[in-house]
Image: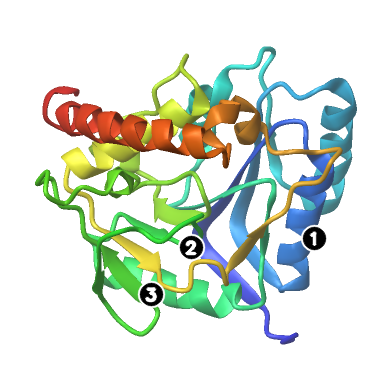
Amino acid sequence: MSDTTYYFNEVTLLITHYNRSKSLESLLTAFENLHCSFEEVIVSDDCSKPEHLLKVTELQKRFHFRLLTTPVNGGLGHNNNKAQDAVKTAYTLYVQEDFMPKPIFPALFVKSMKLMREQSDIDIIRYYSYFSYPYLKPFDTDFSLLDFHPEPWYANHRKFYFYSDHPHVRRSNFFNKFGRYIEGIRGDRTEYRMSLSFVQKKAKGLFYTQFNQVFDQRNTNDEPSTMLDERPEWKLSRNILVRTIRFFYLIYKFSKWSLEYVFLR
């Protein structure tokens, strides 16, 4: 591991947290081991259980982050809104607490910040995904342009996932262009609505081509993913009948999202 020290001025590391204090400790330790520091680190907690919140306050003494809390669980949209409202720097590195940066991160982030500063039209740079964005245009040796096509013959429903809550860097004033997160709905729907705003308002984004090489997502039995808990079991089933039903459901979803792209604001 390199001994180079990286300080990212004008960047806030923004971490959303809910009931996974061990994961949070691992994430912060990983950045520390990579010798990465930021102008500010904010941890936004969404009313975790007392034992987790106690652990977070102990971590605060070690890592010196700013902790945002709330008396009730407001969901993904509320947590993201209050967190982004607290950011004072020009750029936000958004990471949920169950991700771990890999050794490639520091040098890649140096390049990312250079691109963000030199090209004012870049709204977001994404580093992780469960799948590649379906429509990409070459940009350079590391990144591709997210290339959204509204036409229905570009029929992959995943084209609407332009924005993602997976690790990315964005301009901290992105609410001005894309609006705030929708509150009071399921987390996956909140994420989708923000992504819909990105494509409706013609965002420019970059996607790291080797998208599984910058961060790992790590969920343990005692701190499982909360998003997976929100997904109906039928969406994850490998049963042939269920997969057939899901195929037709995806056709319906693509049609619905295409109409929402046109009419939902």
Classify mark 3: helix, strand or loop: helix
Residue at 49% from the left image edge and 56% from the top image edge:
129
The C terminus appears in which quarter of the rendering? top left
Image-based side of 53 in relation to 203, left or right: right
Image-based side of 30 in relation to 134, left or right: right
Instruction: Give the vertical position of 109 relative to 42 (above or below).
Output: below
> At which x and y percent is residue 144?
31, 71
Circles 2 and 3 in contact, beta carbons < 8 Å: no
Residue for badge 2:
127
What's the amino acid at mark 3?
A: Lys
For label 2, the crowd category at 10 Å Cα-Cα, with few meaning under 14, some 14 to 19 and many 20 or more, is many
Classify mark 2: helix, strand or loop: loop
Is residue 178 visible to us here? Answer: no
Q: What is the number of the mark on residue 114?
A: 3
User: Is tag 2's residue or tag 3's residue first in the polypeptide sequence?
Assistant: 3
> At which x and y percent is residue 127?
48, 63
User: Is tag 2's residue or tag 1's residue first in the polypeptide sequence?
Assistant: 1
Is residue 197 visible to us here? Answer: yes
Instruction: Give the vertical position of 259 relative to 125 (above or below).
Output: above
What's the amino acid at mark 2?
A: Tyr
Q: Dividing the picture into quarters, in which one does residue 50 lie?
A: top right
For label 3, the crowd category at 10 Å Cα-Cα, with few meaning under 14, some 14 to 19 and many 20 or more, is few
Residue at 78% from the left image edge and 47% from the top image edge:
23
Image-based side of 205 in relation to 153, left or right: right
Residue for badge 1:
29
The N terminus appears in which quarter of the rendering? bottom right
Classify mark 1: helix, strand or loop: helix
Q: How many marks?
A: 3
Image-based side of 102 in relation to 54, left or right: left
For label 1, the crowd category at 10 Å Cα-Cα, with few meaning under 14, some 14 to 19 and many 20 or more, is some
User: Is tag 3's residue or tag 1's residue first in the polypeptide sequence?
Assistant: 1
